């Protein structure tokens, strides 16, 4: 015999999960809460334990070598992207008037968690249909 309590619990859990994902992308006035914005911190060397929500620009003076951040998926990996002009692949960091960083091109991990995202105006913009916006 089918136990309807398990079906009701599964449907309720699925609906709550969908609502939580939807709240992340809705504007605040519609019940959503904006995700936290990333900030930029300049560093002389790659940090041992990057903080969540911080994009580190590693270098000396006007010479920028690496962009470093903790993977936004939650796996905890430190991601290091080269900013050197002659390196391939190479990323660029732009900081807007509010101090929010953008990183281009996208970051696409081919090992581990396989995350694929952009950092735009201080916010993570996930690539692919099955990822939440963080």
Image (cartoon, helix red, strand yellow):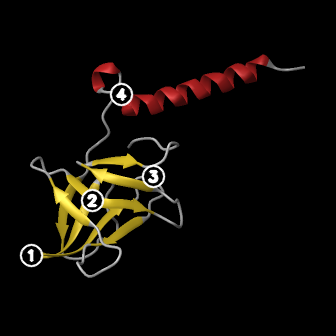
Residue located beneath label 4 in the image: 26
Q: Quadrant of the C terminus?
A: top left
Q: Quadrant of the N terminus?
A: top right
What residue is at 11 percent from the left and 46 percent from the top? 98
- CA gap between label 4 and label 3 equals 20 Å
Q: Secondary structure at mark 1?
A: loop
Percent x, y of residue 36? 29, 42
- CA gap between label 1 and label 3 equals 31 Å
Q: Earlier in the sequence, mark 4 or mark 3?
A: 4
Percent x, y of residue 73? 45, 52
Identify the residue at the far right of this view.
1
Mark 4 or 1: the one toward you: 4
* Observer-nearest of 93 and 71: 93
Dividing the picture into quarters, in which one does residue 108 lie?
Answer: bottom left
Percent x, y of residue 47? 29, 71
Mark 1 or 2: the one toward you: 2
């Amino acid at each position: 015999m089918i136990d309807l309590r398990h079906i009701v619990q599964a449907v309720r859990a699925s609906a709550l999960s969908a609502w939580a994902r939807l709240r992340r992308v809705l504007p605040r006035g519609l019940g959503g809460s904006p995700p936290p914005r990333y900030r930029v911190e300049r560093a002389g060397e790659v940090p041992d334990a990057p903080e969540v929500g911080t994009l580190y620009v590693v270098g000396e003076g006007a010479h920028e070598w690496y962009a470093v951040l903790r993977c936004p998926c939650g796996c905890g990996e430190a991601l290091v992207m080269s900013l050197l002009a002659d390196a391939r692949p190479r990323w660029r960091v732009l900081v807007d008037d509010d101090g929010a960083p953008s990183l281009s091109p996208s970051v696409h991990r081919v090992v581990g968690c396989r995350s694929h995202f952009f950092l735009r105006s201080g916010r993570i913009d996930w690539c692919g249909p099955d990822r939440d916006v963080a």
